[in-house]
Image: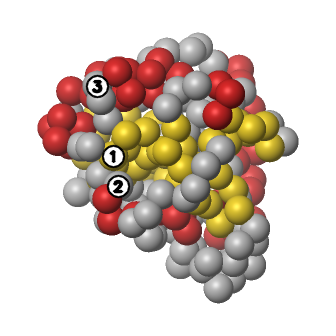
Amino acid sequence: MNPSEEKASLRERYRRERKAAFVPRDFLHILFAPEFTAARVVASYISIEFEPVTQTLNKEILTLGKTLLLPRITSAKKFGGNGASMDWVAWNGASENLKKNKNLFEPIGDPWQPLSEIDIVITPALRVDGDGYRLGQGGGYYDRALGEISGWKIALVHSGELTSEKLPREGHDQQVSAAATPDLLVRFR
């Protein structure tokens, strides 16, 4: 089985496991990490279905006076490859500044520039291994976006979703700096 096929098989299994064990919990403890204390611009996401819940976290990021960016899928071929890419757009917390795109809520507004101002990127993941590689939902959006951003990258996973097993990797996969469960913060680099 090649890495792409292995990832697809793992995603299916991990989604089933996640759905069966899902308990919504917050990740507010990551706000006390030194990287958050120093950050001015934080890119996050609005969680859906059984993903690690970000609504309270996003609200607290705004309460702390930080600029909050959310992803928006775009059909622009910024990366010279196939498929869509992702822009980051500032969001003020108001639901009227969101637009539904399939099952995602995306911010309305102009793309954030320059990306070098992004201090932290919070990403969803199905699993994260001991080297800091994440297995996402399979679109490659976050891997392409993370490759453009030099800030601290942290993946959110549920308890039990940090794995000691090495996840399958492909050339485009990006490492995260850290991963958080509702109870732990693990740094990889």
Percent across and percent down for residue 121 are 40, 49
Residue 15 percent across, percent down from the top left: 71, 36
Q: Residues within 10 Å of mark 3 (few under 14, many from 20)?
A: few
**Secondary structure state at the residue bearing disc 3:** loop
Q: Is residue 136 left or right of residue 102?
A: left
Mark 3 and mark 1 in contact (Cβ < 8 Å)? Answer: no
Q: Earlier in the sequence, mark 1 or mark 2?
A: 1
Percent x, y for residue 117? Answer: 31, 59
Q: CA distance from mark 2 to mark 3?
A: 16 Å
Using a 10 Å C-alpha cutoff, classify the residue at mark 2 as few (fewer than 14 neighbours), some (14 to 19) or many (20 or more): many
Q: Is residue 127 visible?
A: no
- Residue at x 48%, y 57% (from the top left corner): 112
Marks 2,3: beta carbons within 8 A? no
- In the rendered view, how is the structure colored? secondary structure
What is the distance, in whole Å, between disc 1 and disc 2 at their CAs? 5 Å
Camera-side residue of 42 and 136: 42
Location of the N terminus by quadrant is: bottom right
Nearer to us in this view, 92 or 87 = 92
Name the outermost residue toward the right: 102
161 is higher (above) or lower (below) than 54: below
> On residue 64, which mark appears?
3
Tag 1 near tag 2, CB within 8 Å: yes
Kindly identify the amino acid type of the residue bearing the numbered disc 1.
Answer: Val
Q: Amino acid at mark 2?
A: Ile
Nearer-N-terminus badge (2/3): 3
Q: Amino acid at mark 3?
A: Leu
| On screen, residue 66 above or below 168 | above
- In this figure, which residue is indicated by the disc labeled 1? 41
Vertical position of residue 169 compared to residue 69: above or below? below
| Sequence-first tag of 1 and 3 | 1
Reading the image, the residue beneath label 2 is 118
Percent across and percent down for residue 143 are 54, 64
